[in-house]
Amino acid sequence: MSVVHYARPVSGEVGRRERKKQLTRQALVNAAVRLFTEQGYDQTSVADIAEAADVSKRTFFLHFATKEDVLLADGSTRIDLAVRAIEGRRPDAPMREVLAEATKTMIANTAAGDLPNGLAALRARLVVTTPAVQARVLHTMFTAQTRIAAALRRAYPDTLDEITAAGVVGALTGAISAAAVASLQLGEPPERTRAAMQHAAGIALHYIESLDTPDPAAPRASGGAKATPRADDRH
Amino acid sequence: MSVVHYARPVSGEVGRRERKKQLTRQALVNAAVRLFTEQGYDQTSVADIAEAADVSKRTFFLHFATKEDVLLADGSTRIDLAVRAIEGRRPDAPMREVLAEATKTMIANTAAGDLPNGLAALRARLVVTTPAVQARVLHTMFTAQTRIAAALRRAYPDTLDEITAAGVVGALTGAISAAAVASLQLGEPPERTRAAMQHAAGIALHYIESLDTPDPAAPRASGGAKATPRADDRH
DNA sequence: GTAAATGAGTACACTGAGTGCACCAATGCT
DNA sequence: AGCATTGGTGCACTCAGTGTACTCATTTAC
């Protein structure tokens, strides 16, 4: 393999080494997704995955710290998105709006990234069926919270102390993830789950509004959140 | 041992067997707390704990499903408390009030259970330093959420659908736990951490009020939540 | 162009969590 | 006293995850 000797590190390219690395990484993800789907998560060992991807078991752990992490391959992208949404706010934007924007971005992205292989769908299934995966996802989200809370505090340094910032972000993500899992457990289809997440975000955000407006004339149901279309459309 | 032959299974008593079981269980907890404190969590193996408690390693797993679980020995008590607080509500009590009560009970209990051995304090320390413990606690709390959400929904069947119930409870516990961890990470003393939890609960509850009162005349800062003494006393 | 430096992948041995199983012995029940 | 139950044991096993010393392709420096 090699008509071209001197590849092109020119023009800001990645280089063969890095490309090959991403290749094995992708092979591992694909093998994992396939095996998890075919045989189930618990019935698939890391050795199996490595074997199927035709690398050594040690190599697996060169790319992923734990067995669960292979399911979070796309991982930090969404968090980065949220952080950037907060950091790139208009200077005088109210907190509620900024958080609403960040939330919307994240949920939208959740929907998008699914196409390549069935990663997101598989993950969704495993989150409600496999405790180990659920625990890992939960933990990942929790650590992400602190990053987001930090960004938020940086954005509103004199409105928020550490505790309040943590509480706000905790309430937001707590509501969203609880609603998402509840929806998944009910066996609802993806777009309904996304709606559930939005609904829960609306709940949390509705409150947050009252932090923006020190003299709350309108922390009421009328506000921007429109929190209860869902509570109505069922029962 | 044994002047009394036929102990007393009379009058609803526990019996020697059960008593001995609790004894070994307690021995395991004590040994674990001591070793974790002396040598650190990661430096202590389950075999070590079992050895120190003078039982076999196999016995450890007869009492605790995982190494982390030994730290959650008191575990489900607090959840039961919350569930009971919800179930035992006055028939017409507003949701906010019920949840406030449940929250207060839980936080109070958190403070109380610490006395016997340093379990709660140790756990608090490990939650912020040891990922495995943090993950386990998080997961425990998350599963507890569904029980609480179910109880809440049972209490307010026509105000709440599954999703909203999950969202409400998720927001509440998300806010509380995020604030608690933030406080612990700041190295704050226990009573300050408890205050942080209360503060975060107030945040979440303040919103929830608006679910009770379809026509909110007073979902403002004056209400029962008193949400921001903390945000002021720092900044 | 050649040599040194780097870093992905490998082989292998090891620790430690958690499980299955057959068994023993104390306890509880009648 | 005799039988059933059940907490605890010993042992062998699986599997996740790590440390280490090695190879070899690629990259970089000369």
Image: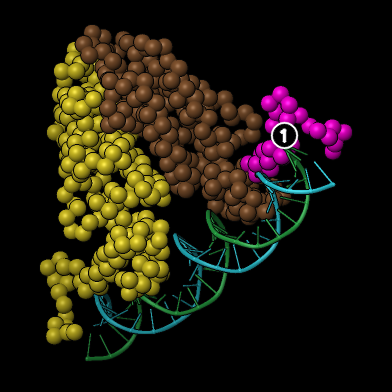
Chain colours: A yellow, B brown, C green, D cyan
| In front of the other: B29 or B146 | B146
> Dot 1: within a 10 Å radius of its alpha carbon, few (fewer than 14), some, or many (20 or more) residues?
few
Query: Magenta includes B17?
Result: yes
Q: Is residue B114 left or right of A157 when viewed as pictured?
A: right
Subunit of label 1: B
- Quick check: is B176 in the magenta stretch? no
Determine which residue is flagged by label 1: B15
Residue B220 picture location, percent across and down: 27, 12
Which region of the structure is painted magenta?
A: B1-30
Q: Is residue A43 visible?
A: yes
**Residue in view at x 25 percent, y 31 percent:** A200
Where, quadrant-wise, is the N terminus of chain A in this rendering? bottom left
Q: Secondary structure at mark 1?
A: helix
Residue positioned 32% across, 10% down in the render: B223
Is residue B96 shown left or right of residue A196? Answer: right
User: Residue A211 lies in what quarter of the image?
Assistant: top left
Q: Nearer the viewer, residue A232 or B199?
A: A232
Please name whichever residue, B33 or B183, is drawn nearer the observer in this view of the structure. B33
Give x and y (percent) for residue A17: 25, 73
Does the image show residue A65?
no
Image point 59% across, 36% down: which residue?
B119
At 24% across and 69% down in the image, what residue appears? A23
Number of numbered discs present? 1
- Residue in front for this viewpoint, B200 or D7: D7
| Quadrant of residue A165 within the rendered picture | top left
| Residue lying farthest to the left in this orientation | A11
The amino acid type of the residue labelled 1 equals Gly
Q: Position of residue A80 (x, y in %)?
A: 24, 46
Q: Main secondary structure of the magenta part?
A: helix
The answer to whether residue C20 is above or below residue D24 is above
